[in-house]
Image: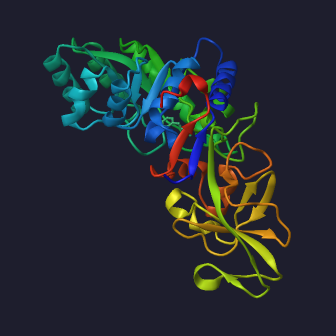
Amino acid sequence: MRNTCVTIHISNFLHNLGEIRRIVGPRVKISAALKANAYGHGALVMARAAEKGGADFLGVASPAEGAELRGGGIRLPILLYGLALPEEAKIVTENDISASVADEEGLAVFEQAAAACGKKARLHLKIDTGMGRIGCTPQDAPGLARRIAFSSHLVLEGVFTHFPSSDESSPVFTENQIGVFSAAVDAIRKNGADPEIVHASNSGGILQYPAARFSMVRPGIILYGYYPSQDVPRPFTAKPVMELKAPVLFVKKIAAGTTVSYGRGWTAPRETCIATLGAGYADGYPRLLSNKGRVLINGTCYPVVGRVTMDQTMVDLGPQSHVRRGDQAVLFGPDPSGPDAWEIADIAGTIPYEITCGIPLRVRRSIREADFCAE
Ligand SMILES: *Cc1c(COP(=O)(O)O)cnc(C)c1O
């Protein structure tokens, strides 16, 4: 088995969740985003951690992700943030997963599925106030909400919206969305429907817009230890949950003028020691870090030299080094003396979401908490 692995620091996740709880208070529900295998961290493990840490809901992207959690014994309410296809409505309802709907057609599908399995389908009406992805118009919301609330097969469990720029410094667009959404919720109530849960805020919304907490918030990236952007307030220290490590496979001394890796993109300026690490872009370490990244080995950072290859990456240890074969290199993680996923993302021109989601399954996950050793 390869020694390249991600360590999942459950205690950091519980810290981040606890801080979100402290900020929103005891009465606002928290729906922890567990989609995309919990941003690459492992859905079932993170679901158990979220349960332990007092989350009220779990957010998934697809019926399959929700069914996986139910199959793993997770009892917390689960909300499908995305839309189900008509043929998936039955699995969703049977698994007691709450679904998002955005139009008459979508709710009719759930009405039929609920009737067929003898259960009520719990629906959240999604209102598009500016994301431009899924959702009904604010004008259509009162009619759709009423239709759900008065159907004998459906429950209007929630209404919600989503923010495309809550992590940016200008508040104009998001504040307008909050106004439009609040007015839509008022109109829904005036029209005789009473949604149990009203929600809007992602991580950026939680950090910047206290007025948008309503009765539930939907944190994602912040739970995994990263701020959604460099522009949001930082009311607490978010602790990264994922740590990517690779073993030193080989150490060699090379002469000045020797080149390293494909394309010979790096030439040793002096005699130096090079370590070859057992991780490359096929382990989720972006090739864009060639000649730009740095790794942490035994408390010291060393630069990546030459191109990152599929399975291996080289770093310059300098002329004198105590680094040995078998030592562990941290490619990113919570240790403040080394790189984190934001540093990697900045170099690669992306966001930490894509870095943690991009760790492939061949990289072993190991869980850092005794009570989670079941995985
Ligand atoms: C992913 C997602 C979130 C969480 O977003 P973060 O930016 O990671 O906090 C919240 N709401 C919806 C609908 C989502 O899809």
Rendered image quadrant of residue 212: top right
Front one among 269 and 118: 269
Query: Residue 88: horizontal and vertical position, in percent?
Result: 23, 34
Is 233 on the left-hand or right-hand side of 168? right
Rendered image quadrant of residue 346: bottom right
Query: Residue 189: horizontal and vertical position, in percent?
Result: 42, 14
The residue sitting at the front extreme is 325
- Scheme of colours in the image: rainbow
Front one among 181 and 159: 159
The residue sitting at the left extreme is 116
Residue 175 appears in the figure:
no
The residue sitting at the right extreme is 320
Q: What is the number of callouts on the image?
A: 0
- Please say if 359 is above or below 162: below
Front one among 31 and 194: 31
Is 236 on the left-hand or right-hand side of 118? right
- Please say if 247 is above or below 18: below
Is 244 on the left-hand or right-hand side of 127? right
Front one among 185 and 86: 86
- Please say if 104 is above or below 268: above
Query: Residue 81: horizontal and vertical position, in percent?
Result: 41, 33
Residue 289 appears in the figure:
yes
Query: Residue 45: horizontal and vertical position, in percent?
Result: 49, 30
Give me the residue at 61% from left, 62% from top. Answer: 349
Give me the residue at 13% from left, 20% from top. Answer: 116
Give me the residue at 41% from left, 21% from top. Answer: 74
